[in-house]
Amino acid sequence: MAEQQPTAVFLRGLDEFQNGKERIQMFTDKLDSPAASEQRLKATSSPKKWGANIYRETDIDDNLREEEELDRINCDKLKKEKVAQESEQQENPNESYGRSYRNEFKFKWLKIQYDRRTRAKKVAEEELFSLKKEYEENAREWIRKLKKVRDERENDQKQWDEERNNLIAQLGDATESSKMYNDLSREYEENRRKWEEEKNDLVAKLDAAVASSELYRGFLHDFDHY
């Protein structure tokens, strides 16, 4: 699987963190709404034996029962997904971390929604605060890891650029040396050609001198016998 760029993963993490904060705020607003206050008032007016702030099932209408059942189904589904994604996260942490943590957050979010209907607001608010704190801490830790990966990549890129520039400089030196060698080679060939011409000229002059000497000797020999 191709490795994702750190910047893309980093931005996706920030988006999920922002979405989580918005969902927490939406849940907080819902807890403080007039409808929620009315439901809590009904619940506390008919407490069960083990607490004054527990909803009676007889006070939960049919729609609320359906919502609770849907929450249970969603929670079970997310539990199964969490087990599968934990295995996937071990194999590819950068790829699955954001998705698995988002589903874990959804699971806890549904649990809070369910607890809001069956337990006191104080308990739900405590869990909401704990979830918010945990989510923010994990998000900061994830962002810190992503920044570390980004810094490592930037450092690797910097080292590679330095090595590349060094190689380019060496190549430039080698090219300059090759140019100097070619110039010297051409100069040598030119001088060798001149030396060859001068040698041939000297050989020709020597041959002419030898011929003249032989001719002069013959003339002297003839003159002596005259």
Image (spheres, rainbow, N blue to C red):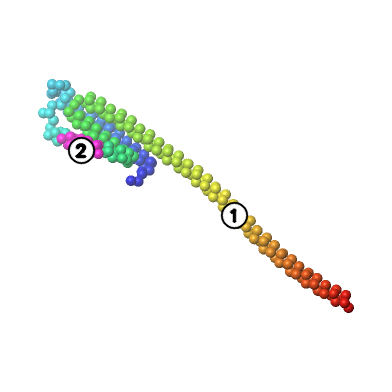
**Residue that carries the numbered disc 2 in the rendered image:** 77
User: Does the segment drawn in magenta span residue 138?
Assistant: no
Per the rendering, the mark at residue 46 is none
Q: Is residue 80 above or below residue 225?
A: above
Instruction: Look at the magenta stretch and give its main secondary structure.
Output: helix
Front residue (pair 167, 181): 181
**Residue that carries the numbered disc 1 in the rendered image:** 179
* Residue 208 location (% of width, % of height): 77, 70
Q: Residue at x 28, y 40 (%)?
A: 88
Amino acid of disc 2: Lys
User: How many tags in the picture?
Assistant: 2
Front residue (pair 166, 129): 166
* Residue 179 location (% of width, % of height): 59, 54
Which mark's residue is nearer the viewer, 2 or 1?
1
Q: Secondary structure at mark 2?
A: helix
Query: In the rendered view, does 115 fall on the left or right side of 199?
Result: left
Task: Examine the image and state in which quarter residue 133 appears.
Answer: top left
The residues colored magenta run 69-84
Distance from disc 2 to disc 1, alpha carbons, whole Å, reads 73 Å
